[in-house]
Amino acid sequence: MKKLCLILSIILLLTGCQGFPQLNSGQIIVSPENSTIPIRGTWKIYQYKRISEIQEDEDSIKAAEELLDRIAVFSDTWAMVADESCTDAKYQIRKVKTRDYMLFHHNMDMEDLNISNPMIDIISIISNGSLFFDIAMLDEDTALIYVDNCFYWLKKVSDKIDSYYANGQKNSQNKIEKPEAKDNLLRTGVLIGLRSTVPSTNEEDIFNERASYRTFWISSYNKNIQSSLEAPDLFIPRRSGFWTLTVKTRKYNDFLQDNIVLEPLVPRGAGIINKIDEQLIKGNIKKDILFVSDDYVAIEYSWTMGSVAERNYRVLPLDDANSLSGILVSDIAREDMRDIFYTSAQAHLVSHGIKIDEELKGIVSVSEDNFTLERRNGNWTLKGRLDLGDRYEEFPIGLSPVGKLVNYDELHVPWDSVKERVPMALDAYTSPNKDLLIVVTGNFLMIYTIENGELSEKPIKKIDIKKGESVVMVEWATGDYVARWEKSFNQLNPYIINQ
């Protein structure tokens, strides 16, 4: 077994020289307390720039100019930009390389926006699990926000929150809390990404199967289903707009390799949207997507060359999804938890009576980026993979991905209650509005309503899914966002789900 580990380790090192690029996302994940957010205060919009010349029609210019001199306010618990606002605001900060961020998210050079800072902070405002806005901090008094294919510059006018806007938020919240108003505003939408396996159609393919993906859009109004649509591939709501994600197989020399292709729904002029590594690894590569969010993708990649094969997990920034070197567990944990991967792995080995002759950290085939996300009892969890030479061992990692890789993952109905109502349930998801629950079984997606924490007797919608099909993405929209998401999804010319 030691000999086999050594052989695999040498192969890994050799293939790394041929094309295992190192992750260079320039991204550090921070989840600050809201009281420390640097954007807190009152701001004014003073300048704008359209993202593409093809958008420069009279109506779009007029719409952009109407936001000039409007006010944006960011408090510890709510946020407002012109006419849009959100409650229960939470703030996440990422430090990114400016050039990479602007190129990958907006296909623009930082010089086009007169930005000289090599690194900037991106502040994401999350409300009820959905993104409200992304703010790029250019300096302590200047910020940049992206709205409807347009960049707007904001200047801080006060560190304080004007009582006029604060009182307006309180009045708005009081209205929402009234039962009759809540009924009129109960709008929920969800994008569900699914993965299935299909036989390979290429006779040269060493892998018998490849993955296929599709996305459902389901919307409801006052707990009544309004739309149920389906489109091929994965449709992802991101901070920079809506994007599609596909996995395409191409031939490289004598090998077949999967590549992840990420493209914006709205074209943004010429340029490379998806970064492809110039140095390509030799061998056959299959990539299966296990999880997708607005910023990250988790994959299992299978690599074969001759009689040697590997299967590894990777969690990657969505904009660098073709790298084979993923983020580390310590990248999403506190500094004092750098050993969490190894302690979790060691605990698994001990509990299963598995003995090894070396320290885990001394084994080359044990890598801190060999982990992924999986569903367990209605929640996303982390699991790692160990290569023990003659087999793989998978183990749970004692760290929650919520707030780091996942924006929203709350199950408002106890898992035991779900299983009691639907004994065949494999997974379940509840909406931020606490009005809908989606149950996944081996054959169906079933949608139930929730009333006072209890499920409806029967599902209000039942959708067939393929045998072995699994959920890789669930993104919720509430309130005004439901109409926006559906309008964008309709640009894909989706099918109507009739079940």
Image (cartoon, rainbow, N blue to C red):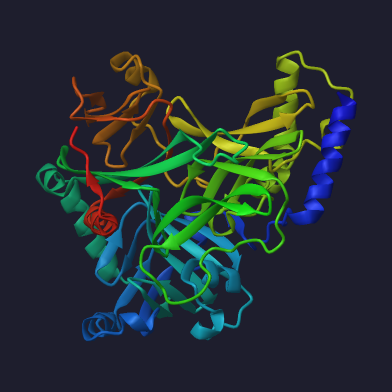
Q: Quadrant of the C terminus?
A: top left
Q: Is residue 79 left or right of residue 40?
A: left
In the image, residue 366 sits, relative to residue 413, either above or below, namely: below
Which residue appears at 79% of the width and 27% of the height?
A: 389
The answer to whether residue 363 of the structure is visible from this angle is no
User: Residue furthest toward the left?
Assistant: 180
Residue 157 location (% of width, % of height)? 40, 81
In this rendering, would 487 be left or right of 285?
Answer: left
Camera-side residue: 242 or 97? 242
Q: Which residue is pictured at 33% across the width and 18% down the height?
A: 417
Residue 418 percent across, percent down from the top left? 33, 21
Q: Position of residue 331 (x, y in %)?
A: 66, 49
Q: Residue at x 70, y 57 (%)?
A: 280
Residue farthest along the front direction in this orientation: 203
- Give 298 or 204, whichever is nearer the viewer: 204
Q: For residue 203, which quarter of the picture?
A: top right
Confirm whether residue 292 shows in the render.
yes
Residue 366 figure quarter: top right
| Count of numbered tags | 0
Image-based side of 342 in relation to 124, left or right: right
In this rendered view, identify the residue nearer to me: 249 or 400: 249
Residue 401: percent from left, percent from top: 54, 41
Which one is in front, 427 or 195?
195
Q: Quadrant of residue 301?
A: top right
Question: Which residue occupies 65% across, 26% down?
Answer: 395
- Quadrant into which the N terminus falls: top right
